[in-house]
Image (spheres, grey):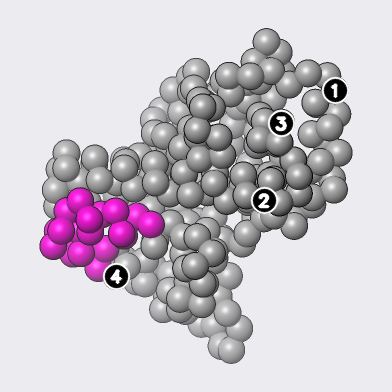
Amino acid sequence: MMTNETAACKIEHHAMMFAFLAKHAIERCGENGKAAILKGMTVYGNERGARMAANALARDDELTTMTNQAYGEWKPDYDGQMEFGQLRTEPTLQTYIAKCAWCDAWKKHNITEYGKYYCVNVDNAVYQGFRSDFVCTPTATSLSWGGERCEFDWGHPLSPREVSELAEKKRKLGTSCMRDFNFHTAHLKHTLSRVLIEMLGADGEETVRMAIDDFRSTFGEEYLKALENVDAKEF
């Protein structure tokens, strides 16, 4: 039990907030629930991408595939939790994820059948929020849907010069544009709840209530209170 310290959400909390919302939306509303959760994830991803773009523009950086890769807003909870990298940089950048903390969380809690909907469009939604004419295309079945690894084509190359610039940009930025998972989990809860209620009405309200109850019973009241301390104006 936490005392006076603020609870610190990790990727597991973020993954499970989504999974609980998806579970109750789909169980209550079937295909309409699925459509609402996927719409919510598109809105959420667009908001994340727009925030990344604002950070880049504030530092006088152009919105390119290279800067998109540089201005990521999160990092793994610990070394070895994720395994990801580049497959190639030309003629288009292609990347992979071979070990995923979100998938591990859903597997741990036996909820992958609902958690997997997180993966349908989030990467593309973030990319298009960053710049509306960009498209990120999955090129393999994702881990959460039974694939061996997630693979993505980002539609534009990284030149050898940009590869060097990306490494230097990441070094300079460090964690300055990253957010902790109290922020990310609060953002996810806020945006998905809004969209679910807009699209599903009273069923959406009940979906959110039940998901929050599940989150509370799984992790404890202190983790919900930690989300309340995040300023929604920053989303």
The answer to which quarter of the image holds residue 16 is bottom left
43 up-or-down from 64: above or below: below
Assess disc 1: are there few (<14), some (14-19) or many (≥20) residues with their C-alpha within 10 Å of its C-alpha.
few
Instruction: Name the spot of residue 122 as percent of width and height, x first.
Output: 45, 39
Assess disc 3: are there few (<14), some (14-19) or many (≥20) residues with their C-alpha within 10 Å of its C-alpha.
many
The three-letter code of the residue at mark 4 reads Asp
In front of the other: label 2 or label 4? 2
Magenta segment includes 203: yes
Q: Nearer the viewer, residue 235 or 214?
A: 235
- Judging from the image, what secondary structure is the residue with disc 3 in? helix
Q: Which residue is mark 3?
A: 66
**Which residue is at a point 68% across and 10% down the rendered structure image?**
91
Tell me the CA gap for discs 2 and 4: 35 Å
Assess disc 4: are there few (<14), some (14-19) or many (≥20) residues with their C-alpha within 10 Å of its C-alpha.
some
Q: Earlier in the sequence, mark 2 or mark 1?
A: 2
**Which residue is at a point 71% across and 36% down the rendered structure image?**
62
Q: Is residue 210 visible?
A: no
Q: Which residue is mark 2?
A: 55
Tell me the CA gap for discs 2 and 1: 22 Å
